């Protein structure tokens, strides 16, 4: 802590101690920070920040790779999640330390942009900081470290690109990629079948451009049955009942109308004074209402629709006419689902019912309401030709299990989509990381300055990935690394760690492959995160507000851990 006041200057000039002093105001302590503010500068601040980042990585290190273990997270309300997914663990943990939060942000960015490689990014970030810490102790300035890391990062990307191969349009390869992305998530046995579903879904929805999977793939989780019953549905499943029991339950060769508005008349608000005095008037008023709705339903039927999905309400009168015309209808369908239905069936969403024409309708081989479990119905829209939105129906024993499968599917969908677009893959199993490390060590030797040390530290940090893969699988990580280095020194750069015996294996031959982009982005995210932390050497923290209990939370509830002390 630096001193923030100046002592009286009596006669001789005191040596300046730096800090926040104002010259000339003799005798008066100058305090520019609010009372209770804590400040920490220099090495001390850096060390604590590095500790925080390492703590984040330690929380997920054991989940890395196909043999990584799961974590069970229990929220303050008692809900449990069992997961192996680094991004999910970090999202659910109530992390408060500001630097730890920065690392979590990196993981989130990696997850949002690429959808995989989160654990890898966080582990490398922490290892980079560990290396930096050692260098700072030896007196290397953080600026030099940051510069060395950046050069190493650029080289690492070059090496990765050199290692990658193009597999555009190779479906078998895409299935392998999906498999690698899903391993370790408790579904290995059926890996291949589920990987095929992922690949089929990705191929169906992509238009050779980046698309938002959330808008094109709907994952429907159905507890009960076995995971083996899971399938892809070229269409959308809507979690709704049909509106009326007399409507058809099943419509083949469906002609589908998507209505944005409602099929009911506006309710009169209480201040609209309509006084209907005579029974005759009431009857004619009702007749008028009925006529409008009858005409609307007639328009729908005339256009040729036999299925209607409506985003808003459908009143009793309209229900009556829809039933009469033999139309299957559902109401209050979510906007996102309407969009997906449009993409799947080729329908155009209609605003004005009376304007509907045959051209607005979409098609599906079958629309059917089916019973799911004991008391739930869902409407399956299936067999859509050229569906640009699809559903994946997952069966599984428990909701928790299904949630974890869903996360694995999302990761896999993202990486497969990525390879469909970029075409480039690299081997997995730690092969690229070992290659980067080996090549960076050679590259480091070309530097005569201290940056050499930073580049070496970078090489060591990337090796943490094969190290972790071996360790989590129960093999001796040092032996595994040494054996791998030997292969790579002979130019066998596809060799990574075999998960059966810890021996070096050709990952391309085994089909353990990942998108180039996942690896590039993981290393980029890690470098950015670590340099961001290294640049901070002054932490000024405002006095913390007292911890306020939330409504419904007991003041004695300490489940939310207090913020770790910053100084
Ligand atoms: P991340 O969040 O970083 O994706 P994962 O837990 O998914 O972390 O582990 C990914 C790592 O596991 C990658 O390095 C990948 O190459 C490796 N991996 C996946 N499947 C295998 C396998 N069958 N053999 C060896 N390594 C594998
Ligand atoms: Mg992964």
Image (spheres, helix red, strand yellow):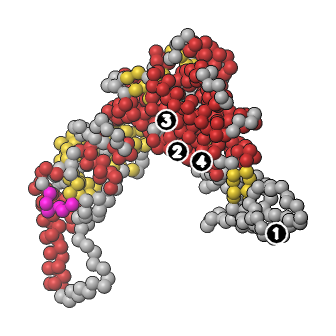
Q: Residue at x 21, y 86 (%)?
A: 276
What residue does disc 2 label? 108
The residue closer to the viewer here, 30 or 203, is: 30
User: Residue at position x 50%, y 17% from top?
Assistant: 494
At mark 1, the secondary structure is loop
Q: How many labels does the image show?
A: 4
Q: Is residue 567 above or below residue 450?
A: below
Residue 370 seen in the figure = no
Which residue was labeled with disc 1? Answer: 26
Q: Nearer the viewer, mark 4 or mark 2?
A: 4
Task: Return the residue at label 4.
Answer: 102
- How far apart in space, not on screen, are marks 3 and 2 (Cα)? 12 Å
Q: Does the magenta stretch include residue 353?
A: yes
Residue 497's quadrant in the figure?
Answer: top right
Residue farthest along the front direction in this orientation: 11
Q: Is residue 199 left or right of residue 110?
A: left
């Amino acid at each position: 802590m630096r001193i923030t006041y100046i002592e009286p200057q009596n006669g001789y000039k005191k040596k300046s101690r730096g800090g926040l002093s104002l010259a000339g105001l003799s005798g008066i302590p100058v305090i520019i920070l609010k009372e209770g503010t804590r400040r920490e500068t220099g090495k001390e601040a850096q060390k604590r920040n590095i500790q925080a980042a390492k703590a984040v990585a330690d929380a997920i290190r054991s989940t890395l790779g196909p043999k990584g273990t799961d974590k069970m997270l229990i929220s303050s309300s008692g809900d449990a999640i069992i997961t192996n997914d680094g991004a999910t663990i970090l999202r659910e943990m109530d992390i408060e330390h500001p630097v730890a939060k920065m690392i979590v942000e990196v993981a989130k960015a990696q997850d949002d942009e690429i959808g995989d490689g989160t654990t890898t990014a966080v582990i490398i970030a922490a290892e980079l900081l560990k290396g930096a810490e050692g260098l700072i102790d030896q007196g290397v300035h953080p600026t030099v470290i940051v510069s060395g890391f950046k050069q190493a990062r650029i080289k690492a990307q070059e090496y990765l690109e050199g290692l990658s191969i193009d597999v555009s349009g190779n479906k078998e390869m895409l299935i392998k990629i999906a498999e690698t992305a899903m391993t370790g998530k408790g579904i290995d046995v059926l890996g291949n079948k589920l990987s095929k579903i992922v690949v089929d879904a990705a191929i169906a929805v992509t238009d050779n451009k980046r698309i938002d999977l959330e808008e094109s793939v709907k994952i429907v989780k159905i507890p009960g049955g076995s995971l083996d019953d899971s399938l892809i549905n070229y269409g959308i499943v809507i979690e709704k009942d049909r509106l009326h029991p007399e409507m058809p339950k099943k419509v083949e060769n469906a002609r589908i109308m998507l209505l944005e508005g409602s099929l009911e008349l506006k309710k009169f608000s209480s201040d609209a004074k309509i006084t209907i005095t005579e029974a005759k008037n009431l009857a004619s008023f009702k007749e008028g209402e009925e006529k409008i709705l009858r005409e609307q339903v007639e328009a729908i039927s005339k256009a040729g629709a036999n299925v209607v999905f409506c985003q808003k309400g459908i009143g009793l009168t309209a229900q009556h006419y829809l039933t009469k015309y033999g139309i299957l209808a559902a109401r209050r369908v979510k906007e996102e689902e309407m969009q997906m239905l449009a993409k799947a069936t080729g329908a155009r969403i209609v605003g004005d019912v009376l304007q509907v024409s045959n051209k607005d309708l979409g098609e599906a081989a079958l629309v059917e309401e089916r019973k799911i479990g004991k008391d739930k119905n869902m409407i399956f829209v299936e067999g859509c030709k050229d569906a640009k939105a699809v559903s994946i129906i997952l069966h599984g024993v428990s909701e928790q299990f299904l949630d974890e499968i869903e996360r694995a599917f999302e990761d896999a969908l993202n990486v497969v989509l990525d390879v469909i677009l970029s075409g480039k893959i690299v081997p997995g199993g730690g092969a690229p990381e070992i290659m980067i490390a080996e090549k960076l060590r050679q590259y480091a030797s070309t530097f005569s300055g201290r940056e050499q040390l930073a580049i070496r530290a970078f090489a060591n940090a990337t090796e943490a990935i094969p190290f972790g893969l071996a360790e989590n699988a129960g093999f001796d990580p040092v032996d595994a690394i040494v054996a791998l280095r030997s292969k790579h020194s002979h130019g066998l750069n596809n060799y990574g760690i075999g998960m059966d015996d810890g021996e070096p294996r050709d990952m391309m031959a085994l089909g353990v492959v990942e998108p180039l982009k996942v690896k590039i982005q993981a290393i980029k995210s890690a470098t950015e995160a670590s340099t961001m932390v290294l640049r901070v050497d002054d932490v000024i923290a405002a006095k913390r507000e007292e911890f306020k209990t939330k409504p419904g939370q007991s003041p004695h509830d300490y489940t939310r851990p207090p913020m770790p002390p910053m100084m």
